[in-house]
Structures are given as C-alpha cells and as structure tokens.
Image (spheres, rainbow, N blue to C red):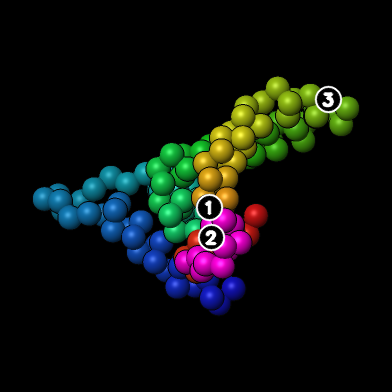
Amino acid sequence: MPSYLPWIEEEIDDSLNELLAETDEDFRKVEIFSYVMSLNCRIGSRILVGKTLCRDPAFLKLFEDHAQLLVVLGMILKFLPTWCRAYIVALSPLRKVQQQIIDLIQPAVLEDYRILVNGGDISTENVYVL
C-alpha cells in the first residue's frame, strides 16, 4: 500500500486543482457528494487500471455509475427474499455497465500484454489489479 500513496496524492491534487481552478469568484458552491464520489472513483481506478484510464471521462462516468448501481441494488436486495435477488440483478442495468467497463479496459490491457510478450517493458503507471 505505501507504493500507492504517491498516486493517491497525485489524484487528489489534480482533482482539487480541476475543481477549484482559479476564477474571479471569492466563493464557489461545490457539490461535496458528487466531488467525493468522483474522487473515490478516480483514486480507485488509478490503483486498478492505471493513470491513462483513470483520467478518461467516459471510464470515470461508467465507474461512478457502477458504484451507484451497487449501492442502490444492495439497498433494494436486502429487503427482498433470497429466491428473487438473482432475477432483480439480472433485470438491472448493472451487467450492461460492467460490460461497457470491460470494453474500455480490454484494449489497454491487451496492448500492454502484447508488449510484455514481445519482450518490451510497460509503464509502471499502468498497473492492472483486475
């Protein structure tokens, strides 16, 4: 975990710089929940899929959608009988979002794998925990 701390610090710093970019305003309204959600997803994706994808707006949107779906489904499923939970998950958009995430990650992972197989060296910025 200590090796991830510089990455986490870099993502927090970059995210805050984007959010609080200099303007002429002395005060600015900030939606904390959406910012924290975005920051958590950005840090998580930096650790899981590397720097390139963690800054891709399309990937971050999917990652945030996935996190929100998991929370909502978890709250719904705990009130339902066990026998119908699998059906509810199958009817939810969760699998579609997961497939979209895979479709975004797969080319980058395959490219790095091809480089490694051919004896090349990939950037340590792209670490695939998955």
Q: Earlier in the sequence, mark 1 or mark 3?
A: 3
Q: Is residue 84 left or right of residue 91?
A: right
User: Magenta span covers which residues?
Assistant: 112-123
Residue at left offset 47%, top offset 43%: 59
Q: Earlier in the sequence, mark 2 or mark 3?
A: 3
Q: SS at mark 3?
A: helix
* Image coordinates for residue 58, horizontal then vertical, percent: 43, 39
Residue at left offset 59%, top offset 73%: 1
Q: Is residue 10 left or right of residue 88?
A: left
Residue at left offset 56%, top offset 67%: 119
Q: Residue furthest right?
A: 83
Residue at left offset 41%, top offset 61%: 11
The amino acid on which the numbered mark 3 sits, given as a three-letter code, is Cys
Q: Which mark is residue 111?
A: 1
Camera-side residue of 82 and 129: 129
Q: Residue furthest bottom?
A: 2
Which of the 4 image quadrants contains residue 14?
bottom left
Q: Are marks 2 and 1 in contact (CB under 8 Å)?
A: yes
Which of the 4 image quadrants contains residue 6?
bottom left
Q: Which mark is residue 115?
A: 2
* Image coordinates for residue 98, horizontal then vertical, percent: 62, 37
Q: Are marks 2 and 3 in contact (CB under 8 Å)?
A: no
